[in-house]
Amino acid sequence: MRLMVKTALVGCVLATLAVSFSYAEPEDSQPMAADEKEMIRKADTPDDPLAGEWIVKELAEAKIPTGVKALTLTIKQDGSVAGFGGVNRFFGKLATDGKKLFGPIGSTRKAGPAEAMKIESTFFKALEKATASNPTDEQLELLDSHGKVLMKFVKAPAKPALTGEWVLHSLSGEAIPAEIKTPTLTINEDGSLAGFGGVNRFFGKVAADDKKLFGPIGSTMMAGPPEAMKVESQLFQAFEKATRATSADGKLQLLDSADQVLAEFTATK
């Protein structure tokens, strides 16, 4: 008899636990509509079509003068946003509420030419109004809530492959004197760089902005033959003035803001 009572009690307890841990769908639960799923688009997916570096081609509300620097927009896989408005750098994130494309945009507060400031203001207002996008492999359109195109972008050209080991061939078109030790430059995948200037070792990083190619360069402080010191000084000045680089056919060229070649390197074998 006791055994039967105990068995009955155990059965009741198990039944109670089964009821306690059962799950019932709420009565008001409805499947998510297709358009709602689209609104909750995650920017961290590897194939996000918005991710990339873009250059403004057209603004609906204003024509971009030829003298204004390129307006840019970079969208990363984590949803962070950054770019250049013509005078100031800006930053922010993609919105997640489905009402706007971008969250609040912050920027530096520098003043610039009136024409550039006007274009920048128009650009920032367009970013604020954008609620949708129409991306393709090479172009991006941002649209307002009425479907009007606010601006058009084109994909930024791929940056040259700077990584590798390079030896200096010439400075401002003049060959390096044969009697000095050949200056070298090594750029690593993480953006760090190092090398030999002819007398001293140097080190630094590739710059993170679009204004200069390299960040500050540090070096040892040894003295050497006058000719070698002269070449090293010119090389360090080239690093300071360089704003971009081209790389093709085993050659690396450093250029200034006027696209003048400051230094040319060849790849080591």
Image (spheres, grey):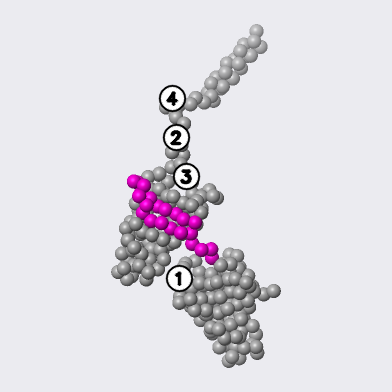
Badge 4: residue crowd in 10 Å (few <14, some 14–19, many ≥20): few
Q: Is residue 16 or residue 257 the one in the foreground?
A: 257
Cα–Cα span, label 3 and label 1: 33 Å
Residue 177 in the image, given as x and y percentages of width and height: 62, 88
Q: Which residue is mark 4?
A: 27
Q: Is residue 240 above or below residue 190?
A: below
Query: Which numbered disc, 2 or 1, marks the residue closer to the eye?
Result: 2
Are the two marked residues, 3 and 1, in contact with CB atoms closer than 8 angstroms? no
The kind of residue tagged 4 is Glu
> x and y percent of residue 257 in the render?
45, 75
Relative to residue 242, is residue 161 depicted above or below? Answer: above
Quadrant in the rendering for residue 198 = bottom right
Question: Residue drawn 36% across and 64% down?
Answer: 64
SS of the residue under disc 1: loop
The residue sitting at 45% across, 77% down in the picture is 258
> How far apart in space, not on screen, are marks 1 and 4 (Cα)?
58 Å
Q: Which quadrant holds the N terminus?
A: top right
Hey, which quadrant is residue 84 in on the image? Answer: bottom left
> Could you tell whether 250 is left or right of 239 in the image?
right
Residue at 69% x, 74% y: name it.
269
Residue 33's disc is 2
Residue contact between numbered discs 2 and 3, judged by CB atoms under 8 Å: no
In the rendered structure, which disc, 4 or 3, sits on the residue that comes first in sequence? 4
The residue that mark 1 highlights is 211
Residue range in magenta is 138-159
Q: Evaluate if marks 2 and 1 touch, with contact meaning CB atoms under 8 Å apart.
A: no
Q: Amino acid type of disc 3? A: Arg
Q: Is disc 4 placed on a helix, strand or loop?
A: loop
Residue on which disc 3 sits: 41
139 within the magenta span: yes
Residue 17, image quadrant: top right
